[in-house]
Image (cartoon, grey):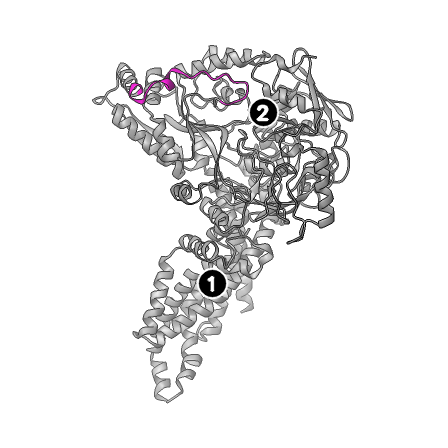
Amino acid sequence: MLSFIIRRLLVAIPTLLILVTISFTLMHAAPGGPFTNERKVPEAVMKNIEAKYHLDQPLWKQYLYYLGDLVQGDLGPSFKYKDHTVNELISSSFPRSAYIGVLSFVIVVLLGVGIGVVAALNHNRWPDYAGMTFAMSGVMLPNFVLAPLCVMIFAVYLKWLPAGGWEGGRIEYLILPIVAMATSYVAQVARITRGSMIETLNSTFIQRARAKGLPRTHIILRHALKPAMIPVISYLGPAFVGIVTGSVVVDKVFSTGGIGQHFVNGAINRDYSLILGVTILVGALTIFFNALVDILYTVLDPRIRY
Amino acid sequence: MKTLHLFAGATMLAAAFTLSGCGGSGDEPVSVAPKAEAAQVSQMDAKSGAKQPGSATTRMHPVTGEPLSAEQVLVRGNGSEPGSIDPQLVDDSVGGAVVNDLFEGLTSSGADGQLMPGVAESWSASEDFKTWTFKLRHNAKWSDGEPVTANDFVYSWRRAVNPEVGSNYAYYMEVAGVANSTAIVNGEKPITELGVKALDDYTLQVSLEVPVTYLPIMVSHYTTYPSPQRAVEKYKGDWTKPGNIVSNGAYKLKEWSVGEKMVAVRNEHYWGNANTIINEVVYLPIDDTVAEMQRFEAGEMHHTNTVPVSQMERIKQDMNDELISVPKLATYMYQFNLQEKPFDDVRVRKALSYAIDRDIIVKYITKGGQTPAYSITPPEVNGFHYVAPEISKMTQAERDAEAVRLLNEAGYNKDNPLVFDLVYNTSEGHKSIAVAISQMWKEKLGAIVTPTNMEWKTFLTEKAAGNFKVARYGWNGDYNEASTFLTLMLSNSGNNDGKWSNAEFDKLLADARNSTDPAPFYEKAEQILSEEMPVAPIYFYRGLRMVSPQLGGYATNNPLDIAYAKDMYIKAQ
């Protein structure tokens, strides 16, 4: 197990390096740069600005500069948000997204698995239909529709909740972002859990347990749930990264100041260092949680060993 | 010393001059409220405290007499996250809006765009308008209590042109004609050679390379605001952060949460603090217009940054009183690429421009009170003598007939149609306009036009490289003077992507630059543009906002779309 973890960590470094290299190349291949503006400035001024950010250097040199800083944990200055470094932008926005994300994730797991299990146990009866109707609508209703809809109902008409803001993460500011964040994931998890659970309940070892006369709840909780969770866990690993690294929609609709905004703004503004910064963050988290999922498999399924 | 009434059309300058003693008479806007009343406000402020709901004595506005809310917290919609709030580095309107509240320049812009004194109390020019002297008020203070002196301006102006600072707006100093600015930007001279000098702590002298009669207007722009040398040198790139920042305007920054909000609080040391009513200003950077509208409707902000065009009908029906349309010195145009055939033919350009029914565009598409444009320079620009061009006096039917005639003459008709792509940067608004206009061109001229969208930076890059035939173009004036628009079309202008070149036009603008009365030159230059049609002006922008009825003092008639928080107040409900 320990050697497995070490191996995964060692693979992570070249993986991240490849990620940085590809992102760096793609980014510079995109037309325009951070200082391409409608209001064009005289050449001399542009030269001064480019010199300040090393953009006048050949690309390979810029790449080496970047790697040099990266090794020291410095993600560089933001090209667009000139008063901030990328480290500052990420360290102020990521915790907010992660906070919303972790809370959403707890709800996704509890509600998603709960609905899935109930639906599977009542296969082809009304709780199943109700659960799956919810799941289908949750999957079909994209959050860029759901989020403004929630704001309209709960903030504009009912005035129960604020329409946006963060305010230190007070609970009333979190509810709508969490709903917008979690709904489609809950729906997905419910569907996957239901399918997997139905399959497990039909497998021979469960039938055998039933034949032995074990109590129903015991069969479900002790024998069926664990193996049924494997496909759910495979889904939740990457989904967790997606949830904690925030959402563009949530950040744009609710102005939470999360990290999701930087993905889109970074690309639109050609804010090279910001794009790379958030890419590295997501890359590292993805690698980490995929490894974690692999470890969880061994816990859930004794046949899996590394 | 020349008195200012010499140049026509500059009544604003004259007005400012009479004001320059400060204080002003009773009919002046809120910011220069008579001293006695203002003092009374601050006294009451001290007694009752800023927040005391249901206090027995409701404060009244010293000028309008409206009852004021006990809680004076202003929440402003500010579009998107500012790129910077360093006066010399700001290059977007949203950063500018914050900087305008935090800092103050030599002059400022009044509710109707009239020139107002800022840190400078009075100013005067030499006979040839090449040397300007600004007298600074003695009571102007930084938020740390230090006095604002002429040296602060010398420092910040040098910063603006300093190649190491790399300001996007360094060229602003060149436009203003400040001596040696170009040489310094090019790295040929040290920054100390810049034509700005502190004669003493409260006298600033500016030397120009050319006569600039409108310099006082230009120094109300944020690039010319002072920067606190001690804070900049101490904190370097972090000097604009809350806690580090020192500013000389009515407010100082308290909190900056990227993507959520910025919060500024009253600067107790500001010279006009006694006249300021708003205690705290919150800026919300919401770039999604629908989300911003929802925040407004939920009662969480006092004014928005813009209005979603898609909801215009509903807003006009339900909330027409809260919808305001502010004049804006900005022009929406289509630019022709002269390097591409047949757009080098003036008949083709004119035909396309004439066939655009601008009334339909402003009435059914933009819907926000925009006005049809037949010139690049908006008629209300200061010092510009607008002469309605021929095209504006015709009926649309006459224009259409003329368009068909011109295009036929150029050899294009329904059998031999003009075929080209019309490019615009991706946006619903630009798309609707492009679709409508290409339809007009098709119906009237038989032209086959494909509207094509491009992502913003791709669009800019392609356009700059000359890879277009006809492209959408918008221009927002930097200052209230015609040259900010007309210089776009100079042969050597970096913004002239269509590569139209006209020696007479260039000469007129060069002459205007060297003249103390540029208006006649501008008039002729605009005439050339209307004959040559290197761009087809479509409409003049308006700034659209939702403004809560609770908010008072919002400047709805400032052509530069500037509304200072210090002039506003929250009315009691």
On residue A237, which mark appears? 1
Q: Residue A135's image quarter?
A: bottom left
Does the image show residue B317? yes
| Percent position of residue A78, x then y | 58, 42
Dot 1 amino acid type: Gly
**Residue position for label 2:** A44
Image-quadrant location for residue B68: top right
Q: Kindly report the distance in space between the C-alpha atoms of the residues bearing marks 2 and 1.
A: 50 Å
The part of the chain drawn in magenta is: B380-399
**Element carrying mark 1:** helix
Is B94 above or below relative to A169? above
Q: Which mark is residue B74?
A: none
* Chief SS of the magenta region: loop
- Horizontal side of B111 relative to A216 (left or right) equals right
Q: Is residue B90 left or right of residue B384?
A: right
Q: Is residue B50 above or below residue B37?
A: below
Who is closer to the viewer here, B462 or B487? B487
**Which residue type does callout 2 highlight?**
Ala
Tag 2 secondary structure: helix
Residue in view at x 30 percent, y 75 percent: A125
Question: Dot 1, crowdedness within 10 Å: few (<14), some or many (≥20)?
Answer: many
Q: Earlier in the sequence, mark 2 or mark 1?
A: 2
- Asked if the stretch drawn in magenta spans residue A263, the answer is no
Query: Percent x, y for residue B376?
Result: 45, 22
Which quadrant would the N terminus of chain B be assigned to in this image? top right
Residue at the spot 51% in from the left edge and 29% down from the top edge: A39
